[in-house]
Image (spheres, helix red, strand yellow):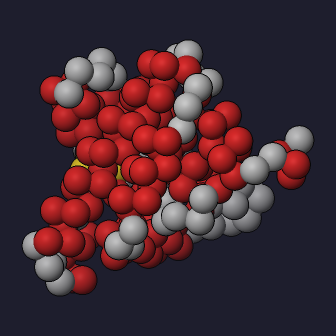
Amino acid sequence: MNEHKTPEERVAELLLRPRGPELSLHLHRTLARILVEFIDHVQSENICSSDLRNSTMTYGQVSRLAMARGADIHYRIAGYYVGNLSQACQVLDFPVISAIVVSQADRTPGNGFRPLVRNPDSDTTDQEYRERQETARDSVLAYEHWSQFIEFLDNLTY
């Protein structure tokens, strides 16, 4: 039962299960670092709010950067791990990091993001969903404490 577990225990369950603890934690840490480095870059560029809509990465870009760092992950699987990171963010009260990772085809976040912002029991329109995604993306890019998320992941053990 999740209500009796600490946030740290809940995050460990999310991040350690997919491919076995050691490999899974390595993939999550690698992807988190890539995303946080991208956020740091956007923040250092002082991009005005009207240009934030272009401040996203595709799953393909994330996958290629991860492979360059020795993490063998196909772009179609990257979304699963990015979604796990977003669930961890939600547990730890960070913005939902998957809001900045989008499909190349339609420029919207994937399945790891949708359930966190779209209620399956409601009639959320595509426009409302896109507005929620933009708000979430802007929150991720404005958040200044991502180093704490990386530090948390670095201290997570399996």
What residue lies at 49% left-to-right and 65% top-to-bottom?
A: 95
Left or right: residue 80 versus residue 38 is: right
Q: Residue 74's image quarter?
A: top left
Residue 9 at x, y percent in the picture: 70, 42
Q: Nearer the viewer, residue 156 or 52?
A: 156
The answer to whether residue 130 shows anywhere in this view is no
What residue lies at 81% left-to-right and 46% top-to-bottom?
A: 5
Question: In this picture, is 101 found above or below 142?
Answer: above
The answer to whether residue 92 shows anywhere in this view is yes
Question: In this picture, is 52 found above or below 73?
Answer: below
Left or right: residue 63 versus residue 24 is: left
Q: How many marks?
A: 0
Residue 21 at x, y percent in the picture: 55, 20
What residue lies at 43% left-to-right and 59% top-to-bottom?
A: 148
Q: Residue 145's image quarter?
A: bottom left
Q: Nearer the viewer, residue 50 or 21?
A: 21
Residue 83 at x, y percent in the picture: 51, 43
Left or right: residue 12 versus residue 43 is: right
Question: In this picture, is 57 found above or below 130?
Answer: above
Q: Nearer the viewer, residue 149 or 77?
A: 149
Residue 75 at x, y percent in the picture: 32, 29
Q: In which quarter of the image is the C terminus?
A: top right
Q: In which quarter of the image is the N terminus?
A: top right
